[in-house]
């Protein structure tokens, strides 16, 4: 079956959040990413080259499969270099269970704006075994195509919940809430818990004042050597990696 202009138009419409939200779908591209997601999300339809299909058939979980040429895939793809396969998946129903914070280590993101940063943080969370990320409503959409690609499949194992962070933190009772600040305590001299919430802030402004006032454990990532002139701050994804690594290091002791 030939690839229709309407289907190409529909795929490109998914660059817009309002269209993704209306149909509760998202787009993923590439053999590794699509392969990871096929076992976790219902697939609405899939486009692939004969090369990909010859290695992956039968696909029992997908009923709408279209074989396309490289040229057709190039017209449908949002990537500069199309990667053999493109699929549209159904978004899962969002269920926010804050009790997971009392039982495990979770992340919270306060207005993170860059799709690449969010995708990288999801990938990091997947690596460090963090299964839940709570995002402020103004944090970039997890289903932004650039974000989905940057997760490298982590979106299959990490659940994101969009919720007002001040309300979330106020609902937590006797649970440590961490955040990174220039005036915080040196992270490497602190005893860090195996459960709780780690808040990471906006790329330019850090953690907002309302959320900051509710954080009960302020941490600082020291530069080296202490006192040396350096850049003002770390990229939020890099800072998240450093913090998560120390939490998991201490948990393993």
Image (spheres, rainbow, N blue to C red):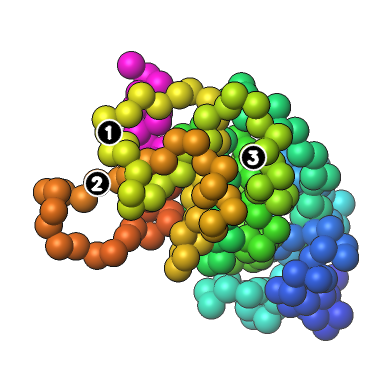
Is 92 situated above or below 197?
A: below
Q: Residue 37 in the image: state x and y as whole percent.
A: 67, 47
Task: Answer with left or right where residue 139 lies relative to residue 183.
Answer: right
Image quadrant in which the C terminus is located: top left
Disc 1 vs disc 2: Cβ atoms closer than 8 Å?
Answer: yes
Mark-to-mark CA distance, 1 and 3: 24 Å
Q: Residue 73 in the image: state x and y as whole percent.
A: 67, 74
Using the rendered image of the protein, determine whether residue 138 is visible from the camera's viewpoint.
yes
* Residue occupied by mark 1: 188
Disc marking residue 222: 2
Disc marking residue 169: 3
Kindly report the secondary structure that dominates the magenta region of the rendered protein: helix
Disc marking residue 63: none
Image quadrant in which the N terminus is located: bottom right
Which element is circle 1 on?
A: helix
Q: Residues within 10 Å of mark 1 (few under 14, many from 20)?
A: some
Q: Earlier in the sequence, mark 1 or mark 2?
A: 1
Nearer mark to the viewer, of 1 and 3: 3
């Amino acid at each position: 079956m030939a690839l229709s202009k309407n289907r190409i138009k529909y795929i490109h419409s998914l660059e817009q959040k309002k269209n993704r939200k209306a149909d509760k779908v998202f787009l993923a591209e590439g053999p590794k990413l699509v392969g990871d997601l096929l076992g976790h999300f219902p697939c609405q339809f899939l486009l692939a080259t004969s090369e990909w299909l010859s290695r992956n058939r039968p696909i029992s979980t997908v009923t709408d499969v279209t074989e396309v040429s490289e040229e057709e895939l190039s017209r449908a793809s949002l990537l500069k270099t199309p990667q053999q396969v493109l699929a549209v998946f159904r978004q899962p129903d969002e269920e926010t269970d804050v009790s997971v914070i009392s039982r495990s280590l979770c992340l919270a993101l306060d207005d993170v704006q860059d799709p690449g940063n969010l995708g990288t943080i999801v990938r990091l969370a997947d690596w460090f075994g963090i299964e839940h990320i709570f995002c402020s409503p103004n944090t970039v959409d997890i289903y932004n195509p650039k974000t989905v690609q940057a997760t490298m499949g982590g979106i299959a194992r990490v659940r994101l919940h969009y919720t007002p962070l001040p309300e979330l933190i106020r609902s937590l009772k006797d649970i440590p809430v961490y955040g990174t600040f220039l005036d915080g305590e040196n992270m490497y001299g602190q005893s860090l818990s195996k459960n709780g919430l780690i808040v990471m802030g906006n790329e330019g402004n850090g953690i907002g004042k309302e959320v900051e006032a509710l954080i009960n454990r302020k941490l600082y990532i020291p530069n080296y050597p202490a006192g040396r002139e350096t850049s003002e701050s770390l990229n939020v994804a890099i800072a998240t990696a450093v913090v998560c690594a120390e939490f998991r290091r201490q948990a393993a002791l």
